[in-house]
Amino acid sequence: MKKRIAVLGASGYTGREVLRLVSRHPQMEVAAAMSARVGAEPEPPELPFDGPIEALDHDRLADCDGVFLCTPHGAAAMHARAALERGCKVVDLSADFRLRDPAVHASTYGEDHGPDLRDRAVYGLPEFHRAEVAAADLIANPGCYPTSVSLPLRPLIERGLIDLGADVVADCKSGASGAGKTPQPRTVFGSVHENFLAYGVGTHRHQPEIWQTLGTDRVLFVPHLLPVFRGILATIWARPASGVDAASIRTALVETYADEPFVRVYERGMPELNRVQMTNFCDIGVADVHGRVVLVSVIDNLVKGAAGQALQNMNLVLGLPETEGLLS
């Protein structure tokens, strides 16, 4: 019997992406696709799901195995409680449970709507928290930028291969879908087309999550907006620890991810966006530039940076093969 899945916030970019992935999953079916807003009217179907986006009804979750929360920040806690009370496994794609420190969450996102659930949530970066995810019932799905930065950097920091006495720079570029479906002056076609810009410099909400995930505040993160719809390319440069070169860093990454289904480390050359778009892969390249190491990682922000990673996590918490529905 297939696992029954509900998607709350089904009409947004990440909600639509979850519907796309679950619709082709051999062991899941969409039992309910609903708005995340109380009192919202039903909406037309979002392809490839052929049913309507229904009005919110938490009682519909009672016969579901898993729930994806594709909601705005601040809204997930209410829905998570309702789903957990009804025995569902929950993967939250918002930022409501990502930051462990309540004070950091409050300064980053404002009021904390789920302090009672914060310690219950597991940070869902499967490559590093697979066992904890599989044993949990509430998963905080990582942000897209933190995923693109943490996968190449975290193994190197944990092994002491990066000199944290010097700043590490993460120069990251994202497609416009990273800002969500609600129109904003900076993300409408007329602003994005034939344009390129830095934004949120020193103030972006993913900076604290990057520091938390890497265990250091030595990473300077600068986001940019690309004139494309989907994808993130992160260029990271750092000073290697004494006696460490690019070859040994590449070897460490190859060893770390040798058995990981969704991380590919290049032996030569650099990854490009079009190699990962519409996939759940993170591709990583390494180069030595005048004594500095340069790492380039690429992901699809809507897949490995959101819905695909969420499906990885849902597979784990429901006891299904982790790659199910994610490898064509």
Image (spheres, grey):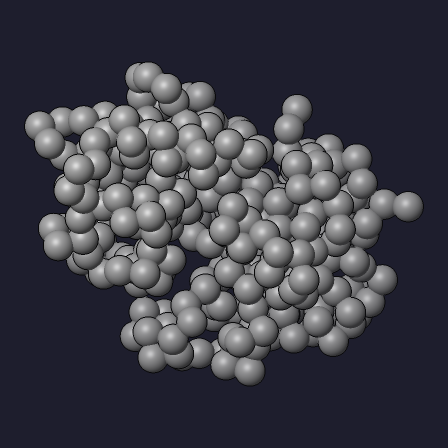
Residue 234: quarter of image: top left
- Residue 88 lies, in percent from the top left, at 75, 65
For this orientation, the residue located farthest to the front is 243
Residue 137: quarter of image: bottom right
Is residue 143 visible to the viewer in this orientation of the structure?
yes
Q: Residue at x 80, y 59 (%)?
A: 64
Residue 189: quarter of image: top left
The C terminus: image quadrant: top right
Q: Residue at x 63, y 70 (%)?
A: 80
- Residue 237 lies, in percent from the top left, at 19, 38
Say left or right for 250 vs 182. Answer: left
Say left or right for 85 vs 221. Answer: right
Is residue 35 visible to the viewer in this orientation of the structure?
no
Q: Nearer the viewer, residue 197 or 173?
A: 173
- Residue 222 lies, in percent from the top left, at 21, 47
Q: Nearer the viewer, residue 10 or 235?
A: 235
Q: Is residue 218 above or below residue 96?
A: above
Q: Nearer the viewer, residue 48 or 69?
A: 69
For this orientation, the residue located farthest to the left is 290
For this orientation, the residue located farthest to the right is 1
Q: Is residue 120 above or below residue 328?
A: below
Q: Nearer the viewer, residue 305 or 54?
A: 305
Q: Residue at x 72, y 41 (%)?
A: 321
Q: Is residue 78 above or below residue 189?
A: below
Q: Residue at x 53, y 76 (%)?
A: 119
Say left or right for 283 vs 164. Answer: right
- Residue 177 lies, in percent from the top left, at 42, 41
For this orientation, the residue located farthest to the bottom is 116
Q: How many marks?
A: 0
